[in-house]
Amino acid sequence: MTAAGTSAASLVAVFLTQPSAAQEPAATTGGAVLEEIVVTARKRAESALEIPESITSFSAEAIERANITGLEDLGAMVSNLSLSQRADGFPNVSIRGLGSFGNTQGVGFYIDDVQNFTDASARIGDVERIEVLKGPQGTLYGGSNIGGAIRFVPVRPDASEFSGRIKGVLGEQSLRDIELMLNTPLGESDWAVRVFGYSAANDGFLVNGNLPRANGGEGSSDPDIGAWEEYGARVALAGPMTDRLSFYGTLRWNELDAPNDVWTTELDNDFEFPTVLGRTYNPRMYRDTVAGTLQFDYELDGFTLTSVTSYTDSSLEENIDLDISPEYVIDVFRPIDFEIFTQELRLTSTGTGPFEWLAGLYYLDFKQETDAVLLIQGGFSLFDGVIPTAEEEATTLQVATFEDRLRKREQLAGFATASYRAGDWEFGGGLRVDRWQADVTNRDNGLTGQQEETEVLPRASISYFLGDQGSNIYANVAQGFEPGSFNLSNFEGETSLFGYDPEEATSYEIGYKARLADGHVMLTIAAFRIDYEDRQFEQQIADPVTGNIVEGILNVGDSTQDGVEFDLSWRATEALMVSFSGGYVDGEWDDGTVLSDGSDLSGLTPPYMIEDSLMLALDYDRPIGNELRFLGRAQVSRIGSFETDLRNQFQNPDYTLVNLRAGVARDNWELAVNVENVFDEEFYTDTTLFPNFNPLIPQPSLVIGTHGQARLATVSLNVRF
C-alpha cells in the first residue's frame, strides 16, 4: 500500500481514474478532480478516455485498496465479466457472454505484453495497473481473445532511487502471506533491477469429512482438503543500451501446491452448498512455471521498433478423484507439460500529428504434452452391485491410458492499425491476417488430426469529441476468433481424431465517455450486439456407428448477445470517492440450433453467461491528526445467475458479496483490517454438468460446483522504505 497516496478512485470505471495526492483543489468546487489513467491497451501509451472501446483499468493503489489478490476479486468488480479460478487452477472467464468455461477459454491473459497460457491464476503482485479490454480483440491480439483480454502491467525498474516494500498478512483459515519488493539502481548508470517475491498459504474452509463408505469403512485424510501453498518471484532489469536502444528483460517463477477439482456435488437445482466433502483422499495439483521475456525498443525518426520475445516452460501434475465420492472407484493421475515460444515485432508511430499508426508481425509456437493414466480401483465392483471388502476397495485393479496426447499450435500473423483525427472527429481501423495450424496426436493409438486456416480480422471505429476534456461518442465494430483443434477420441472406423472448427464473433458497440461536473464525475455507457458463430462447448456426443458416448469439444451453433453496461466515478468530497457500475446481457441460441441427440436449443440461453451485475464501492481517505490518515472502503457486488448446461436444466443462482476494509496510514506504512464476504454468503463461482462415475448415484451426470470464498478476516501491515 502506498503511504502518501490518495483514496482509490473508481475501481470499475471503463477508463478508471485516480486522484493525485499532490493535486491542488479544483477552483470551481474546492475538491480534487479525477484524472485520466494512461493505458497501453492498443500497444501505445494513451488516455483511456479517448479510446473508442470499453476498457476497465485498475491502478496499483486501487488494487491495494480493494484487496485484489486473485481472479475472483477482479471478477466481482467489473461489469459483464465472469472470472474465477477453475478447480484445477486455470481461469474460468467470459466477457459479455463471449468465451466459455473448461477447456475452451476465449479471453486472453497477458503479462509484459505476452500472452499467458499456463499460470494466469498465479499471484497478482507488484503491478502498475490491470487493464480489462472488453469485446473481441482479434486485430491486435489474435486468437484466444474472442471475448477480450486482461492485461497485467508490472511496475518497471526505476533508476532514479532505491526503494522497497514488505507486506505481511495474517488471517482466519490459518492464512499467512508475505510479499517483498526491492528496486535498486545499478551504479551511476541509468540501469536498474527490480525484484518481487511472495509466499502464501491457507488451510481453506472446505473439510474432508472422511464419510463412511458402502462397506462401512472410513478414510483418514487430512480434514483441510482445501489447503494450498504458493510461492513466486519475478526479476526485472531495464536500462538504455545506446541513445536510441533500450532493454527490458524479466524472469518469473512460481510454484503452486493446491487442491485439485475439489468440487461439491449438487443432485438438483436446489443448491445447498455443502462444505463438508466425502473423498477417499485429498486430490492435489502441483504446478511449476518459469517464464522469461526480452524486450528491445529502438527509437527512429518518427517511429519506434519494438521486439518482444518470450519463452515459457510449465509443468502441471493433477490428481483427480474422478468419481467424486468416498468410494475407491476411479482416479486419474494427469501430468501436463507446456513449452511456449512467442515473438512479436512492431513499428509504432511517435509523431504528434493527427495520424497515428502501428504495424507488426507475431509468431507463436505452442506445445502441450499430456500423459495421464486411469486408476480403476477395487470399488469398481460397485457398478455390478458388489460391495468390496476393505482390502479390495483400495486395490488398483487396472492402470489404463487415459490421455496420451501431443498438442501443437502455430500462429503467424501480420497486423496494422491506424487512426486519424480531423477536428472533432476521429476515424480508426485495423486489420490482422492470422494463419494458424493445429496438430494433435493420440500417442496411445497413433491417430492424428491436423487443420489450418487463415483468419482475416478487421476492426473499425469512429469517434466524435465533445469539448476539450476528452468526452466523446464512439462506435466500433470488431472481430475475434478462437482456433479449432482436435479431441482425443475418434469415431468408429475413422482414421483420424474428430475435431472442431474455430469459433468467430463480430461485435458492434456504441458508447459515451464523459467528464462532468468540472472533472469530478466520470461516466461511461456502452451498448453492444454480438454475433457469435460456431460456438465451442465441451459436451457429450454419440458415436454415429456404435452409439457409444464420446466426450469432447464441439461446435454447437450460433448465438446472439445484446447488452448494456455503465460505469460512474464521482469524487463526492475531498475524502470520499463513489464508484458505481453495472451490466446486463441477454443472449440466446439462433433458430435451428440442434444437438446431435435432437435437443433443440433454439431460443435458449447459452451457459456461463452472467445475466446482470452491479457493484457499488465507497472509498474514504482523510487526515485524523499526528500525520495519520484513516482509510476505509465498503464494496457491495451483486453477481447475477447463469445457466449451467446447454439445455437450461440447471442455473447457478445469483449472489451478493459485501467486503469491508479499514486502516490507518502514515508516510511509509499502513495497517489495515479486511473482511471479505462479510455476511458469509454461500455461492459457487462456477457450476457445470459432469459425467457421473459414482455407481451409488443412479443418474448419468451431476451438477458440480466450485465454492466461492467464505467469510475471511485478515490484518495486513505494509511498510515502504
Image: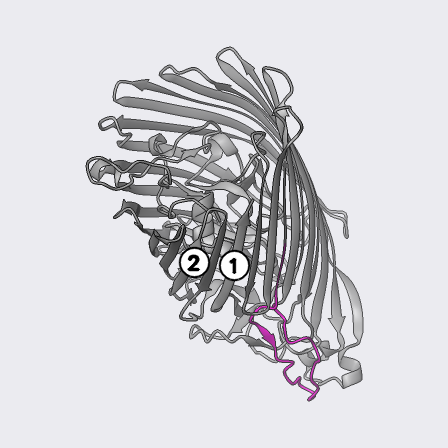
- Residue 616 image position (x, y, % from top left): 32, 55
Q: Estimate how packed mark 2 is, as few (under 14), some (14 to 19) or many (20 or more) residues with alpha carbons within 10 Å.
A: some
Query: Looking at the image, is 136 positioned above or below residue 211?
Result: above
Instruction: Identify the main secondary structure in magenta.
Output: loop
Count the labels in the image: 2
Q: Which residue is mark 2?
A: 663
Whether 205 is among the magenta residues is yes
Depth order, front residue of 331/596: 331
Image position of 425 (left or right of 270)? left
Looking at the rendered structure, the kind of residue marked 1 is Ser
Image position of 200 (left or right of 351)? right
Q: CA distance from mark 2 to mark 1?
A: 9 Å
Q: Estimate how packed mark 1 is, as few (under 14), some (14 to 19) or many (20 or more) residues with alpha carbons within 10 Å.
A: many
Cβ–Cβ under 8 Å for marks 2 and 1: yes
Q: Which residues are magenta?
A: 199-226
Q: Which residue is mark 1?
A: 716
- Of all residues, the one furthest to the bottom in this rendering is 216
- Of all residues, the one furthest to the top in this rendering is 301
SS type, badge 1: strand
